[in-house]
Amino acid sequence: MKKLGLYAMAAMALMFASCEKEEPPVNLSQPPVLLVTPDKQDTVFDVAQPTFDFAIENGDASDYLVALTLNSDDLNISFADTTTVTSYTFDSLPDGKYEAVFYLLNSMDYQKVDKSGSVSRRFSINNSTLIITFEDVNLGESGYWDGSDLSGTPKVEESWGSQVTNYYGSFADNGFVFENVYTSSDWSSWKGFACSSLTDTETAGYTNQYSVVAGQGAAGSKKFALAFDDNATFTCTYPEGYTTCTLKSMMVCNGTYAYLEMRDGGFGKKFAEGDWFKVTITGYTGETQTGAVEYYLADFRDGKTFINNSWEQVDLTLLGAPEKVVFTFDGSDKGDYGLNTPKYVFIDNIAIELVK
């Protein structure tokens, strides 16, 4: 009786185990069907990298691959690819109309599953991203432009009890104008924006103010801009033909001058527990603020020991589509005349999302 009882128990255990693992039956008499999402024609994507998701009806996804072709007669684009039965994201398609065709392959021999047919999807891309790179700004032999060529409009003004001549100039990239004021006097100086290609990461002090501590522009570029002092401003003129234009992001980095001051000390203090330095980027349309974002260029609060020394992306979508953008600075190291930390931030690759 004991043997029969053990056999019966084993059989019951196997029965329950097989029931737990049993999957819905596949109807082998029917061919597999490829399901594609979006499941409708003429989808409009507002991103340049549209994604299509896949599933298999009446088959095991691991037994198949998805082959695809993409064509656009308007843009003279045509290519093919193969992917697993999960999803596929197209890479950076320009605005226009497209047709994609998807069909199944056997994963063993890469032969088309004829009986399953194919699935086509017409779609369009209605998105563009404009990037402000500064690569076309003329810097001259010095490797930087700060208004010292006196190309700006001169204006005699009073400063600290003396008469000085301020030259109001700018440089531009794709409709974005970066304002600069160069002061011609015994202590020639500038404020606002300058443009540079200098990458000295070792020399300390004010004479190295045009060098970025990352040692290159964002994404390895050659040129970049730098904002100095409060109220550095650039204005925004957006291209025509789009329903919305939105500031998307900006790359930022410390300059070598400010970085070494905060790391080692100089005119300002060597940063220690509790110290911080930040830039605030504010958008305006007329006198109305559209939004503001902050980025800490150094942060020694709450046990942190961070000083930025590489290009980092700052999300600007809170600013919307401002007419102008203004930079201001704040920090923990202050004296009788304000911040002791050099008030600089380097910027590059400003992204503007354009939607038709």
Image (tube, rainbow, N blue to C red):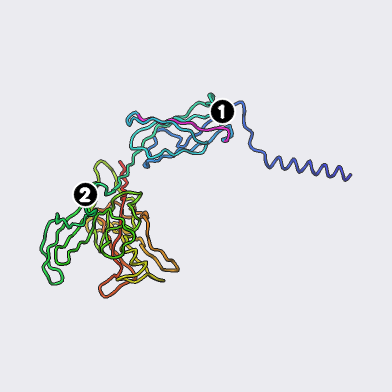
Residue ID at (22%, 61%): 191
Classify mark 2: residues with Cα within 10 Å, few (<14), some (14-19) or many (20+).
some
Mark-to-mark CA distance, 1 and 2: 57 Å
Q: Quadrant of the C terminus?
A: top left
Of residue 252 and residue 95, the one placed in the foreground of this image is 252
Marking on residue 138: 2
Residue 155 rendering spot, x and y as whole percentages: 11, 61
Tell me if 148 is positioned left or right of 28 in this view: left
SS under mark 1: loop
Marking on residue 109: 1
Does the magenta portion include 116? no
Q: Residues in magenta?
A: 62-72
Residue 15 rendering spot, x and y as whole percentages: 74, 40
Asked if labels 2 and 1 touch by Cβ distance under 8 angstroms, the answer is: no
Q: Is residue 44 above or below residue 332?
A: above
Tell me if 307 is positioned left or right of 209 in this view: right
Marking on residue 156: none
Of residue 356 and residue 231, the one placed in the foreground of this image is 231
Tell me if 140 is positioned left or right of 55 in this view: left
Which amino acid, by three-letter code, is at mark 2? Asn
Residue 110 rendering spot, x and y as whole percentages: 54, 28
Q: Quadrant of the N terminus?
A: top right
Residue ID at (67%, 41%): 21
Classify mark 1: residues with Cα within 10 Å, few (<14), some (14-19) or many (20+).
few
Residue 61 rendering spot, x and y as whole percentages: 56, 35
Which amino acid, by three-letter code, is at mark 1? Asp
